[in-house]
Amino acid sequence: MRNTRALAAVLALGVFAPQYGQAQSSPYQGKTITIVVGYKPGGGYDATARLLARHLPDHIPGKPTVIVQNMPGANSLIAANHVYNIAKSDGLTIGTFNRNLPIAQLTNVAGVKFDMRKFAWIGSAASESTILVIRNDLPYTNFQEMKKSGKQIVIGATGPGANTYDFPLLVKEFLGVDLKIVSGYSSSSDIMLAIERKEADGRAGSYSSILPFIERKLVRPVIRARATEPGIERLPVDEDLAPTPRAKAIMALRSAPEVIGRPYVMPPGTPDALVKTLRAAFAKAIADPKLNAEAQKAKTDLNFVSGDEALKVINEVLTQPKDIVDELGKYIKFGS
Amino acid sequence: LIDALFQGLYLVLQWKAFAFMLLGIGLGFWVGLLPGLGGATTLALMLPFVYTMQPVEAFAFLLGMHAVVATTGDITSVLFGVPGEATTVATILDGYAMTKKGEAGRALGAALGSSLVGALVGAFALALAIPIVRPLVLTFGSPELFMLAIVGLAFIASLSGEGARGTLRGFLAGGLGLLFATVGQDPQAGVARFTFDTLYLWGGLDLVPVLVGIFAIPEIIDLGVRGTSIAGELPSGRLNKGAFEGLKDTFRHFGLTIRCSRIGTFIGIMPGLGGAVAQWMAYGHATQSARNAEERKGFGAGDVRGVLGPGAANNSKEGGSLIPTVAFGVPGSTSMAILLGGFVLLGLVPGPDMLTTYLPVTFSMAWTIVLANVITVAVSFLFLNRLARLTTVRGHLLIPVILVLVFVGSFTANNSYGDLIVTLVFGGVGYLMVLAGWPRSPFVLGLVLGKIAENYLYISVARYGAAWLARPFVLALFALALLVVLYPFIQARRRAAGGGAHA
């Protein structure tokens, strides 16, 4: 550990040698790093960023101050454009955005002024496992029974672009389940209430946010997307049930960004040494028991995926053939 | 139960919890006073500090802060005509009008007095309603929530000017508000509506810059044009004695204050309606209490009842919105959604446990709301009359300060220059509306309720087809909406008849 830190410091010094003459000082000594969050305070992206901001300084040589700046708007396109085009590539700006930005770039959403591949990737702080749950009092205990029943199932959703909407939409289109997706609920807890009063039969969403309701025996999970975590490994995966390669490709494309559910990047052209320093710092912070104790309390589970891995996922998404992209565009709209 | 009640009080009164509550109150005091900076945002920013606290301390801190925001927000609204919070806009209508008449002290006294009563009613409801809240909330499905939004819109009839022409203008302004509420990405097809290819408008119009623009800017222009102080050239003698007069007003119209508190609590309990709605329904209800045409004209020109109504409702809704948060884990407002994050952090699971094992904690929340408001109102009264004297400061000294606060406040919505442009544009709209004699409150009501009405209507139709129209509560609410729309006319007719009889 100490060695990597020292190594990173030495590497960083190589770049900044003219500015930071003193041998023992680190490029981050006395500096302030800003994490730009593409959402307002209060949501999951913001909470993760604030958690990291409290613990990152301990793991960056020179102990810089880390602050969070909220730059909400357009499902975080505004923040992404800012970090890509305006922020300086001096290693003092980090951005964390909507995980679906690669989809936005892929489907040529107006307003995208960045190339996800050219950001300096630190990595992802957590993955997001999407599951579909149905009310416990329905007579189906698993996906096959639900499918065979031939009965219509009402799924509450927030809106296109959110996993509450997109995931069940593909299940409905490709897996032959009669789902009726009703969107317009203001939040996922609003959908949960609709399920309680039997207005909706089920919903999709992240496993962590639904878990309390599974434990309360209000709902049970029936199917999940690719990304997984302990507790839901044995659920059927939508991609495995896909009837055609094309359907499978589209499902895979939808769920790919969930593997890098909390992406962290720096402006293009940020010196490699600084990117490496921060990658190491993120990895160590996320392994830090102190941070994990807090994450546990907030019922979130962080796990670090390094920048190289993240870039692989991004490349996989962005190199799809045109016909697949066109087909995807029919179902998936970039949103919240 | 009684045991738990006093155990709750005892928990809050322990020195650590009490100290945290005072700290929270101090913070909330300023958050409320400053326009723009909202209670929800501040709660989110303060959340990390509760990691190491005990549940009671944490809620004393967070709720103490949150409970007083609407109380001190009223102060800004009344004194300067600038909304201190998105939830304290309706107090401007009559509160600021009173200030201009030189009755700032009385208006402030009334705002604070009614806030206190509202907070008490809300807290009382929190303590009482817990056993019956589950069935209540579960009866209100999307169709009922849609109808509730319609009832809200029906109050436009009471917020408009007198006569057919006034009503027409009111509903047109409301329609314009509904139209502006459609700006942004729609939640059914994901289509961007009226965004003019700007990213800023994707998320829709933010309430704070719009409200600040439409209410504050015209008043600032007016103040500049008049070239005097806010209270004009009135003798300042009345300012000093006003505060207690306002407090007395609260009890003079005690029935109204209580009724408006109940409206606020009810709207608070309903998840998904949002905090900005309650004040307008309460204001609409307050105007209904006018006994004759003269009195009706007085609303908007400085009737103290127009301050009492929204003042009470915007505080009572806090206790109300805590109810579904505690009982279901379903937040009644944005602030409560963030508070819910606090529950999770502290290892508390909202739901039945909060009513049994953790009942004292639940009661301690109600006590916090009560204590925080009592302390705030008491402290405020100490220097209320001094605050009121600000309204005798000459306009050209005051305007720069207010303008800075207005624009900084708007900017906090999205940290974007777009916020400033929206403020200016709606400032212009507001000024033109005032100039032409169009009421601004129906516009705001339309804007606030637009998204809610649209979404719940869509869900109702998509889920139930036409069958939702026949649900009993939908029919009852429809009848209520009709009654609310027709009330001004019924009242006018009764007045005419009554007047004839007396003559």
Image (tube, rainbow, N blue to C red):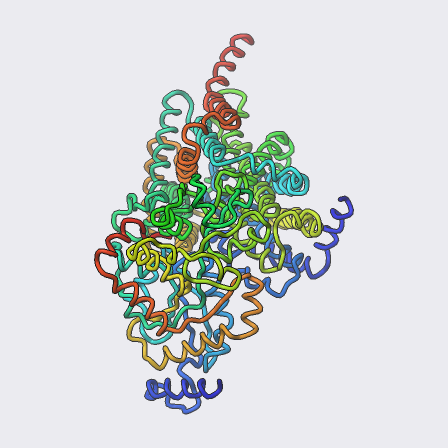
Q: Nearer the viewer, residue A290 or B421?
A: A290
- Please state the total of marks drawn on the protein image: 0
Q: Position of residue A260 (x, y in %)?
A: 39, 65
Furthest-left residue in view?
A322
Position of A63 with respect to B210 (left or right) is right
Instruction: Please give the name of the residue rendered at 40% of the width and 85% of the height, measured from the top-left corner.
Output: A8
Q: Quarter of the image holding residue A96? A: bottom left
Q: Quadrant of the N terminus of chain B?
A: top right
Q: Nearer the viewer, residue A87 or A77?
A: A77
Q: Quarter of the image holding residue B193? A: top left
Q: Quarter of the image holding residue B131? A: top right
Residue B220 visible in the picture = no
Residue B42 visible in the picture = yes
In the depicted structure, whether residue B282 falls above or below residue B502:
below
Q: Position of residue A252 (x, y in %)?
A: 34, 59
Q: Position of residue A167 (x, y in %)?
A: 39, 52
Q: Nearer the viewer, residue B387 or A98?
A: A98
Furthest-bottom residue in view?
A23
Q: Position of residue B396 (x, y in %)?
A: 40, 49
Q: Nearer the viewer, residue A213 or A290?
A: A213
